[in-house]
Amino acid sequence: MKVKSTLFDCQAAGLARSVDVIAGKWKVKIICHLFGGTKRFGELRRLLPGVHRGTLTYELRQLQADGIIHRTQYPTIPPTVEYKLTAKGTTLRPVLMALQRWSKAQEPETAASASEENP
């Protein structure tokens, strides 16, 4: 008997594209910090210890190109740049919260399987 999956179309490009939008070491962390409101570039660097300036710039540009964040540059010297989530970006909150809940639910299982593998 063949079971029909009505929840996911695993061949659909949309699912893979959605994952690509948040894939990477820093993107989810950037988005989570922006849930707290608008941040300047320097603030994000302080909030993300270990991120290189070029990497942060690259990931911010990708998020901007995907319509997740909005970049505003003010004509000051030195230039002031602020980032905030777009309406599209704020729709990621329940998705990331669901991933966080799933991750927390896996913690006891992960600890138990690690102790089984390394007696």
Image (cartoon, grey):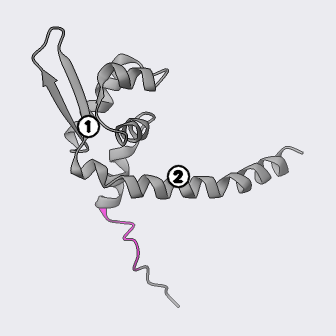
Above or below, 46 relative to 105: above
Out of 115 and 76, give the one closest to the viewer: 76
Name the chief secondary structure element in magenta. Answer: loop
**Disc 1 and disc 2: Cα gap in Å?**
22 Å
Q: Determine whether, in the image, residue 93 is placed left or right of residue 105.
A: left
Q: Position of residue 11 (x, y in %)?
A: 35, 66
Numbered disc in front, either 1 or 2: 1
Q: In the rendered image, which quarter is residue 52 located in?
A: top left
Viewer-nearest residue: 3 or 6: 6
Query: Mark 1: few, some, or many residues within 10 Å (few <14, many ≥20)?
Result: many
Q: Which residue is mark 1?
A: 84
SS assignment at label 1: strand
- Picture mark count: 2
**Residue 58 pos. (x, y %):** 30, 27
As helix, strand or loop, the secondary structure at mark 2 comes to helix
Between residue 109 and residue 86, name the one nearer to us. 86
The residue under label 1 is which amino acid type? Lys
Q: Residue 70: image x %, image y %?
A: 20, 37
Q: Which residue is mark 2?
A: 100
- Residue 81's place in the image compared with 96, above or below, is above
Q: Quadrant of the C terminus?
A: top right
Q: Residue drawn 44% across and 26% down?
A: 47
At 77% from the left edge and 47% from the top edge, which residue is drawn? 114
Q: Residue furthest bottom?
A: 1
Q: Amino acid at mark 2?
A: Gln
In the image, the segment drawn in magenta is: 6-13
